[in-house]
Amino acid sequence: MALLKAVQNGEFLSATLDLSLPFEAGEWQLENGVLCQLTARGVLTVIPPGLSAASKDIVISSGVHGDETGPIELLQQLVKKILLGDLMPEHRLLLIIGHPEAINAHTRFIDENMNRLFGGINDEKNVDCSRANLLQCSVDAFFQNSPLKNAERWHLDLHSAIRDSQHYTFAVSPFSEHKTRGLALFNFLHHGEIEAMMLSGSAAPTFSWYSAQNYGAQALTMELGKVARLGENDLERLDAFNQAMLALVSQQSLPDYQGDKQVCVYRVTRTLTKHTDQFAFTFPANQANFTYFEEGAVLGSDNGEEYVAAKGGESVVFPNPNVALGQRACLLVKQSDVDLTDQVVAKF
Ligand SMILES: O=C(O)CCC(=O)N[C@@H](CCC(=O)O)C(=O)O
Ligand SMILES: [Zn+2]
């Protein structure tokens, strides 16, 4: 079946991944009036017939890393519900399957980590750079061409962690110069029963940062469980998040959270960068995210420089000594007692 026809039938993921099907752009309307625009492989805009003053512009992306497949399955389910008329979106949506070549290859990336390529347009020297450029242009077009004036902008970039984690689900809030940490975003995290949130204090060229920095979007990198092959994910464990995501796209706004789950908040204290090939950690490669190290514990070293846990201790997240030179080898975080219902955090 041709690519466009397959997408129209709800098969967004399989049509996106079948690279033998030539890409066809297309625009069509569903019986319920929803307008769909397929503008690039894996890039679908959805526009409900009746936009209101409360409508938002929401980007949901998955598969920016090809081996993080649980969120890709969730996105496919969401798209299918919309395309078959089973879910009426309330907001303009840009729904993205990030990196088809990497997904097909079951790898994080092909030549370089695409989630470090959102700092602006790249030289198109490989497929990761070309795809990052296309995704940046797609996000630009989506936000810039919105008929909604002063609409709230959101971007949820869905990932899953490589290793075990003391928090099965968590979010990274990228640093930006805009107020991109609103109370509605925290309310969403509570509804999704997301266990932890890290507040980043410095810019990083990730996809969620791109939308926060350039468009003031309420943006998060969401870490949802652990990497597994497509079709082998335990989506039950992500059900609270999935329900919150479905509600986000189909309701004007989420009701104030009344449950008793609390998001554990961390501030990023430091980013350790790999400067030389001597970079090494003192702990095993599979050390769980959020492992805590007492003050003074040696965490690793790089060409004779030792990294030691700071005053009060620090926890390590995303430790990876195998990254390219000049890239982030881990984040160090400290638990913070800020309350996510607090306007003070929401100011930033
Ligand atoms: O589990 C890991 O080590 C990596 C999971 C992952 O891909 N995380 C994102 C986080 C992006 C951010 O800091 O916002 C990444 O490393 O790109
Ligand atoms: Zn990822």
Image (cartoon, helix red, strand yellow):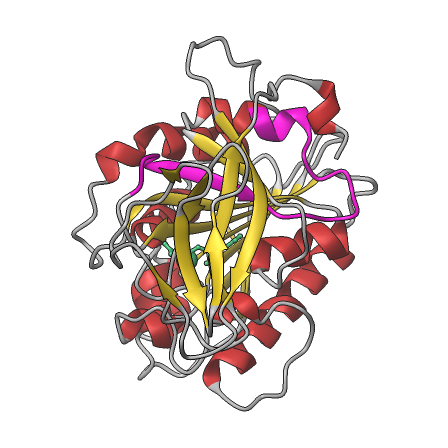
Looking at the image, in which quadrant does ligand 1 appear? Answer: bottom left
> How many numbered markers are drawn?
0
* Front residue of 126 and 246: 126
Quarter holding the C terminus is top right
- Is residue 23 shown in magenta? no
Relative placement, left or right, of 247 versus 138 is left
Question: Which range of residues does the magenta coloring cover?
Answer: 165-186
Please identify the quadrant where the N terminus is shown: bottom left
Most extreme residue toward the right, as rendered?
149
Residue 36 at least partly seen: no
Where residue 217 appears, as percent x and y from the top left, is 69, 45
Q: Is residue 3 left or right of residue 197?
A: left
Q: Is residue 109 above or below residue 46?
A: below
Q: Residue at x 46, y 44 (%)?
A: 222
On screen, residue 151 versus residue 250, left or right, reads right
Residue 181 drawn at (x, y percent) = 67, 34
Q: Furthest residue to the left?
A: 232
Q: As rendered, which of 60 and 116 lies closer to the eye? A: 116
Query: Which residue: 57% across, 50% down?
Result: 270
Q: Is residue 235 above or below residue 327?
A: above
Does the image show residue 53?
yes
Identify which residue is drawn at 26% across, 59% down: 285
Where's residue 153, x and y in %? 69, 43
Residue 228 placement, left or right of 269: left
**Is residue 177 magenta-colored?**
yes
Residue 227 appears in which quarter of the rendering? bottom left
Residue 8 picture location, percent across and down: 40, 59
Judge by depth and name the residue closer to the eye, 327 or 241. 327
Quarter residue 152 falls in? top right
Rendered residue at 65%/61% (across/down): 139
